[in-house]
Amino acid sequence: MSLRARITSPEENGGRGEDGHLVTSYRAKLLEEIDLAEMSSLAAAERRARLERVLGHIISREGPVLSTVERSQLIRRVVDEALGLGILEPLLEDASITEIMVNGPDAIFVERGGRVEQLPLRFASNDQLMQTIERIVSTVNRRVDETNPMVDARLPSGERVNVIIPPLSLTGPTLTIRRFPRSFTLHELIGFGSLDEQMLYLLAGLVQAKFNVIVSGATGTGKTTLLNALSGLIPDGERIITIEDSAELQLQQSHVIRLESRPPNVEGNGRITIRDLVRNSLRMRPDRIVVGEVRGGESLDMLQAMSTGHDGSLATVHANSAEDALMRLQTLASMSDVEIPFVALHDQINSAVDVVVQLTRFADGARRITEIAVLDSHGGEPYRLATIARFNARPMAADGRVHGAFEYFPLPRRTADRLYMASQPIPQAFGVARAAHELTTREAR
């Protein structure tokens, strides 16, 4: 293999072999010639430019003789090793990659377009992977070692990073970096096939009429993306408070307060939970509360806020169906430190939740709204969900895609009346049920 091939194709051995020694050798020479104290005072872009300039001089002085392409590739790899994240650096710069999954030094996977693929890349050793992990977590003032083998944090650049190392991980140091795409509007999501225009008009009316909306779905179904798009429908003059574990929402309104939870420090102190933030937000005179994901006792506080004057609030929950979403909310609310009977929690959910929007990720990687359901029950009645829109999927076609069609059903009279009183039109495709038997309902207990 030529020197050029070895430099420009590190995936052949991920840093092992002759090109790996070349990178290691020049990295050591580079570190010998720079003033670390001076480098620490420079901004990131200036630091990289300085290293590239110094390394260029070293290569010109000591060889080897390289073409322009070979030279730039070698400089890039050495500087990435010395300053950046090594073989992960180009992956982070690839806008098509939404998730990077490192399962030990020899297995690197990425997600592109909803599909997961393994890359022919590898770290030279466990130590090199650990050095990369330590460099990542140090940017958020965290550390990872045997006494603190798990880290979950948001990087300054916005990515969410999760690390788990031995002895908890039996496959070696494991690193997951989730990159958040830019925010999409509902019109753009129509272009992706996630919903259609009739559903957009309906969702716009529900949000602007201040229905409390729960976005439900499994991992990776696009809950945060849809929540962000729905939040964009909130009128600009309202005071919105967003509450998240890792700040992902990118609302464009002028009156937005963003709150983010905080993990404990290395001594185990200073933790601020989602529940703490939800409770505090109620003292901040919010018009709307948007919770990135309810996953614990904060569910109770969120439900109480929804049913006591904070209409139009939005949240996501991890569930596989609209019925599961209601049951999960009830279970999560019971996890609070306030002992409330399940019957009372049931009544609270019937009072607080208006709409459940269910998302599904299909085998072809497409993410779609598969159901919009209105909670049409009251008080102690069993949960009664009225489906007003759903996606009927067909088996995967020969082109590897899952096709189907959206279907619409009449709205319950109570829902239609709320939309009418808020001056929100009902899309023609839906209509209004004149009697209970016209509704597409099911019960959940």
Image (spheres, rainbow, N blue to C red):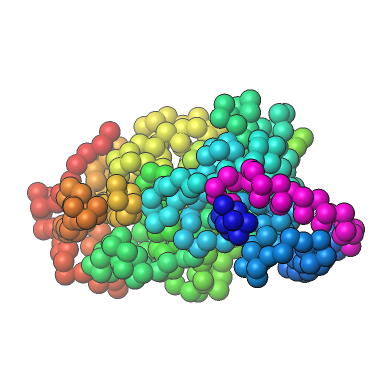
Spot occupied by residue 236 in the image (x, y as percentages of width and height)? 48, 74
At horizontal 81% and vertical 50% (from top left) the residue drawn is 28
Quadrant for residue 205, please give it.
bottom left
Relative to the observer, which residue lies in front, 425 or 130?
130
- Is residue 139 at all visible to an observer of this figure? no
At horizontal 46% and vertical 37% (from top left) the residue drawn is 333
- Is residue 341 at all visible to an observer of this figure? yes
Q: Main secondary structure of the magenta part?
A: helix
Relative to the observer, which residue lies in front, 114 or 27?
27
Q: Is residue 376 magenta?
A: no
Query: In the drawing, does residue 103 fall left or right of residue 348?
Result: right
Spot occupied by residue 384 in the image (x, y as percentages of width and height)? 24, 43
Relative to the observer, which residue lies in front, 94 or 53?
53
Residue extent of the magenta highlight: 10-38
Spot occupied by residue 112 in the image (x, y as percentages of width and height)? 43, 55
Does 187 sit above or below residue 432?
below
